[in-house]
Amino acid sequence: MNNHIHWYPGHIAKAERQLKEKLNQVDLVLEILDARIPVSSGYQNSEKLTGNKLKIVLLNKSDVADNELNKIWCSEIEKKYNCPCILTTTKDRKDVPFIVDKILKEAKPVFEKLKARGLLPRPIRVMVIGMPNVGKSSVINKLTGKSKAKTGAKAGVTRNQQWVRVHPQVELLDTPGIIPTIQDDQQKAIKLAMVNSISENAYDNEFVAFELLKILEKNYKQEVMEYYKIDENEFSIDSIARKRNWIIKGNEPDIQRCSQFILTNFRDGKIGKFTLEKPTDF
Ligand SMILES: Nc1nc2c(ncn2[C@@H]2O[C@H](COP(=O)(O)OP(=O)(O)O)[C@@H](O)[C@H]2O)c(=O)[nH]1
Ligand SMILES: [Mg+2]
C-alpha cells in the first residue's frame, strides 16, 4: 500500500497567479467549500489570495454532509473567515434568491462608493472560486439558470469568459477561479482525495479507503456496519470484500475493487451523510 499523496508545487504558483489575475475583475468572491471537509477544502491563506475582496462562503454539498455539523460549521466559518457563510446544495435552486440577496447586501459599500464618486451605478461583479470538484460549475449553473444564460462578451475580458446577469445589479463570471489544492499537508491531501478533489493518479485507492474507514469507524460506526452488513470486528476493506464475495486468486479479497467501491459509496453519500472534520480541526 502506497501511503503517500503526490503533489507538484510547480503547478501551485502558476494557478495562484492565474487566479489573482482573474480576481482583478471582480468586486466579490463566492468561495465554495465542501461541507464534508470545510477545513481541507479551504485555502490555508484565503485572505492572502483574495485580498480585500468582499466574500461570501458557500458551504456546498450540504445534502451529503452531516446535518448537525452543517449548522455548527456554518457559524464557525463565519467567525474564521469573517464573512457570511451560506449552507447550500446544488441539488435544488430554492435558495438562489437568498444568495442573490446576500450578495446585494454585501455589495452595498461598492454601490455607495460609486455613488459618492458621482459615477453611474453598475452591477456588482462576482466570481466563484474554490478547489477542484467542490461544485463551482454547478453553483454557476444554478445561479445563472439555463434559461437565463444570455451572455455578452465584454472588452478586456478573455474571449472564453463571459458575464452573466443574475440580477439587474449582479453580474457573475461564467468561469470559476480554481484554487490549487495545496497538498504539502498530507492530512489535508488525504481528505481531498476522499472527496475526489485531487487527481486519482496522485494516490492509492487502498490507502485512501483505509484512512476513510478509520474516520468513519470513529464517528459513524453504526451506519457503516449497517450499510456493509458487517459487525464491529469486520471494520476493514478486507472484511467488506470477503462479505461481498469479491475474491481473487489465492483466495485473497479483491482489495482494489473494494477500495474503489467504498470511496464511491462515500462520495455519493450512499452510506450516510458524513462530515469528516470537526471545528476543533481548524
Ligand atoms: N451531492 C452533491 N454533489 C454535488 C453538489 N454540487 C456539485 N456536486 C457534484 O460534484 C461534482 C463536481 O461538481 P462541479 O460543479 O463540476 O465542481 P467544480 O470542479 O468545482 O466545478 C459533480 O459530480 C457534481 O454533480 C452538491 O451540492 N451536492
Ligand atoms: Mg468545473
Image (tube, rainbow, N blue to C red):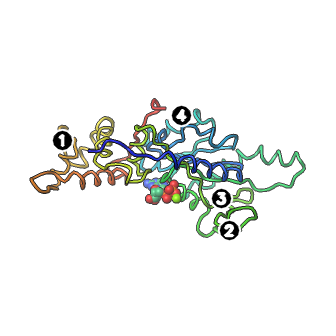
Q: CA distance from mark 3 to mark 2?
A: 10 Å
The outermost residue toward the top is 280
Q: Residues within 10 Å of mark 1 (few under 14, many from 20)?
A: some
From the top left corner, tell me how far across and down residue 156 is, in percent.
74, 61
The circle on residue 151 is: 2
First reached walking from the N terminus: tag 3 or tag 1: 3
Residue type at the position of mark 3: Leu
From the top left corner, tell me how far across and down residue 237 is, in percent.
22, 46
Q: Assess mark 3: CB under 8 A from ligand 2?
A: no
Residue type at the position of mark 1: Glu
The circle on residue 173 is: 3
First reached walking from the N terminus: tag 3 or tag 2: 2
Left or right: where 197 falls relative to 81: left
First reached walking from the N terminus: tag 4 or tag 3: 4
Q: CA distance from mark 2 to mark 1?
A: 55 Å
- Which of discs 4 and 3 lies nearer the camera? The answer is 3
Residue type at the position of mark 2: Thr
Q: Is residue 159 above or below residue 99?
A: below
Residue type at the position of mark 4: Glu
> Which of 231 and 246 lies nearest the eye of the viewer?
246
Q: Residues within 10 Å of mark 4 (few under 14, many from 20)?
A: some
Mark 4 — residue?
Answer: 76
| Element class at badge 3 | strand
Q: CA distance from mark 3 to mark 1?
A: 49 Å
| Element class at badge 2 | strand
Q: Residue at x 32, y 53 (%)?
A: 265
